[in-house]
């Protein structure tokens, strides 16, 4: 049992060398150099298989030592593998100075091209950023102008509605005044006709044609002036006129609405002219 333990320890100590390539045979290193560092299968020393069944259960300390050594061996193998991969990844060493200088120049040219490409990309990114900022500013200005124009349109629409309401009110007032004037004129004409008939009835009738000729009024060449009677409207008549149903105003064409909006004073003047013409008629 002691001899087996010593043998295992010696094997472990041989594997746990400080040199990462001590476990690799010399012919393997030569094969790597001859193949110009081409990727070859990694050859490492195979660690000994732990034989746990040889150790009794009473020797727990030696078993833990072996497990720790196996873990160290695994880490060493990983380190060897990484070192070999790094050596393979390195470019082959060129002994000729001219070839080495040409290779360095090629590398410098590649780096300069890459740097130029990155600079161009960075310049394009800056230009795109500047354009984006300008577009955002233009969009902000357009939004502000749109908001102001929308507010102006709303104010104009409300102004148009108020003007339409005022025009309708004026139209209805003038229509009611015209109806009241017509009613008053009819009443006055009826009253005048009644007074005239009463005067005719009260006047003495002439007996012959000579008396008729004598009582005929003579023409006068003097200037004269017609005195219009003043119209007095009572409260009952006003109440009756206001209670009458006023017909709604006829709808105006779009051109007339636009003209009324642009020049309301002209529209009122036209309506006054029509009203005066109706009274004259």
Image (spheres, helix red, strand yellow):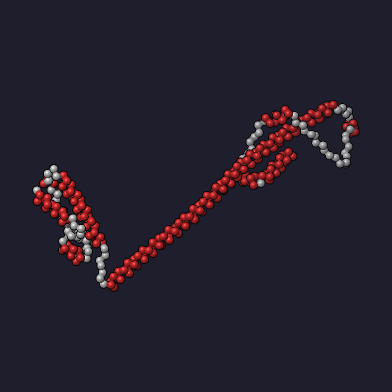
On screen, residue 16 versus residue 206, left or right, reads: left
Frontmost residue, 139 versus 67 = 67
Q: Position of residue 276 (x, y in %)?
A: 73, 40
The residue that appears at 68% across and 36% down in the rendered structure is 173
Q: Position of residue 237 (x, y in %)?
A: 72, 29
Placement of the C terminus among the 4 image quadrants: top right
93 to 18, vertically: above or below = below
The residue closer to the viewer here, 101 or 149, is: 101
> Where residue 103 sits: x, y (%)?
30, 69
Q: Toward the viewer: 59 or 174?
A: 59
Q: Residue at x 20, y 65 (%)?
A: 33
The number of numbered badges drawn on the structure is 0
Decide which of 203, 49 is in the foreground and name it.
49
Residue drawn at (18%, 48%) of the image: 65
Quarter location, residue 191: top right
Q: Is residue 261 left or right of residue 133?
A: right
Up-down relation of residue 192 to residue 119 (above or below) = above
Q: Is residue 86 left or right of residue 1?
A: right
Answer left or right for 81 relative to 149. left
Asked whether the viewer can see residue 16, the reply is yes
Q: Residue at x 88, y 28 (%)?
A: 207
Is residue 182 visible to the viewer in this orientation of the structure?
no
**Residue farthest to the bottom, as pictured:** 98
List x then y, in percent, for residue 129.
Answer: 45, 56
């Amino acid at each position: 049992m002691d001899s087996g333990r010593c043998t295992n320890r010696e094997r472990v100590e041989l594997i746990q060398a400080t040199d990462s390539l001590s476990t690799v045979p010399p012919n393997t290193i030569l094969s790597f150099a001859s193949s110009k560092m081409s990727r070859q299968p990694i050859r490492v020393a195979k660690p000994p298989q732990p034989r746990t069944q040889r150790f009794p259960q009473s020797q727990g300390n030696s078993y833990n030592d072996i497990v720790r050594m196996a873990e160290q061996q695994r880490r060493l193998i990983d380190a060897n593998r990484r070192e070999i991969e790094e050596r393979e990844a390195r470019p082959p060493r060129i002994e000729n100075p001219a070839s080495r200088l040409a290779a360095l120049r090629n590398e410098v040219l590649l780096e300069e091209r890459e740097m130029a490409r990155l600079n161009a990309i960075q310049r394009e990114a800056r230009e795109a950023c500047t354009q984006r900022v300008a577009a955002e500013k233009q969009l902000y200005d357009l939004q502000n102008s749109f908001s102001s124009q929308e507010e102006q349109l709303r104010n104009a629409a409300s102004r148009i509605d108020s003007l339409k309401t005022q025009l309708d009110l004026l139209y209805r007032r003038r229509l009611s005044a015209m109806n009241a004037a017509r009613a008053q004129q009819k009443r006055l004409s009826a009253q005048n006709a009644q007074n005239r008939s009463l005067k005719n009835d009260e006047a003495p009738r002439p007996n012959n044609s000579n008396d008729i000729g004598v009582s005929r009024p003579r023409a006068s060449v003097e200037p004269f002036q017609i005195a219009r009677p003043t119209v007095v409207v009572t409260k009952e008549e006003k109440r009756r006129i206001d209670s009458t149903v006023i017909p709604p105003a006829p709808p105006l064409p779009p051109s007339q609405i636009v003209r009324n909006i642009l020049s309301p004073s002209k529209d009122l003047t036209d309506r006054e002219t029509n009203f005066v013409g109706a009274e004259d008629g």
